[in-house]
Image (spheres, rainbow, N blue to C red):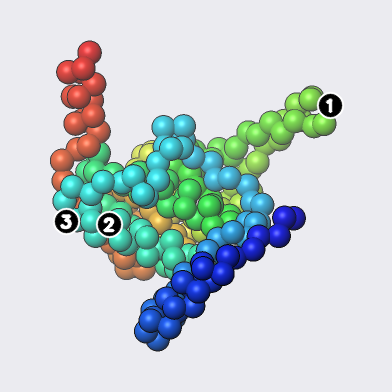
Amino acid sequence: MEQVKIEHGTLREIMERAQRMSHEEILAERERLARELRESQPRPTVPAPRIPRKFTGRRLTDYVPRTPSQKVALEAVRRFCDLAAKGQGVMLALIGPEGTGKSHLLYGAAHELYRRGLRVYARPWYLLADELRYGRHVEPYGADGESDAVHLEPWQVRAELWRHRIVLIDEVEWTAGTDLDYRELKKFACHAYDNELAVMITTNWNPLRDIIGAAAADRFTEIVIAGPSGRKARQHQEHEAA
């Protein structure tokens, strides 16, 4: 590696600047350098979360809050990521009508946590509910390129869900005329609370207790998001452009 030398003039400027800095500024500079060092370290290799194609490019940094409640939601999600990264139990529910950015925030959080080197389980509820009802068919391919189909039974899907420390579930809703949604969500919420998991869900249902029960809902911090539908606004712009 090439040796980089600091010129005398540059070194003198650094020393003079350091002498002018207050104690608080020195501590802040030290923290900045430490943060840069941490961020430069290689991240552990973990599988990328399964994110629907529509949301693969969503980031917390490009979420634009248009209402006070959206600003609150963004800060709550950022706080969720910080706590989850520290291994702390936190349960957050984003509640609101279609198009207010709930899925953007959830999948943006999935990417942020993955960027920090954390394993994240992310699924839309309509898929997960079917897998908990019927199981999941997967087709891993061997080194020879041949398919080796595997069917996971519902109890195996549940076990896979429950063993993750960070779980993000999008669009929680009723999916059938049975109590499966209520039963599975209630049990998982209790499991998450008892084992201090980091869980985020989104839903259009308000109040949350109507779909997961009062006891399970009480374990979540509920953020109600209000505002115009960004989805409809984008569709209108696309229509006007066409």
Amino acid type at circle 2 is Ala
Q: Which element type, helix, strand or loop, lies under badge 2?
A: helix
Label 1 Cα crowd, 10 Å radius (few <14 / some 14-19 / many 20+): few
Amino acid type at circle 1 is Asp
Residue 73 - label: 2
Q: Which element type, helix, strand or loop, lies under badge 3?
A: helix
Q: Which element type, helix, strand or loop, lies under badge 1?
A: loop
Q: Toward the viewer: 112 or 28?
A: 28
Residue 144 - label: 1
Residue labelled with disc 3: 68
**Residue 85 sits above or below residue 45 on the image:** below
**Residue 116 sits above or below residue 157 on the image:** below
Would you say residue 83 is visible in this rendering? yes
Q: Position of residue 119 (x, y in %)?
A: 58, 55
At 79% across and 24% down in the image, what residue appears? 146
Q: Report, in whole angstroms, how far the alpha carbon at label 1 lies from the one at label 2.
A: 47 Å
- The label nearer to you, 1 versus 3, is 3
At 51% across and 68% down in the image, what residue appears? 9
The quarter of the displayed image where residue 28 is located: bottom left
Q: Is residue 44 left or right of residue 12?
A: right
Q: Position of residue 162 (x, y in %)?
A: 56, 58
At 35% across and 58% down in the image, what residue appears? 77
Residue 49 - label: none
Q: The N terminus lies in which quarter of the figure?
A: bottom right
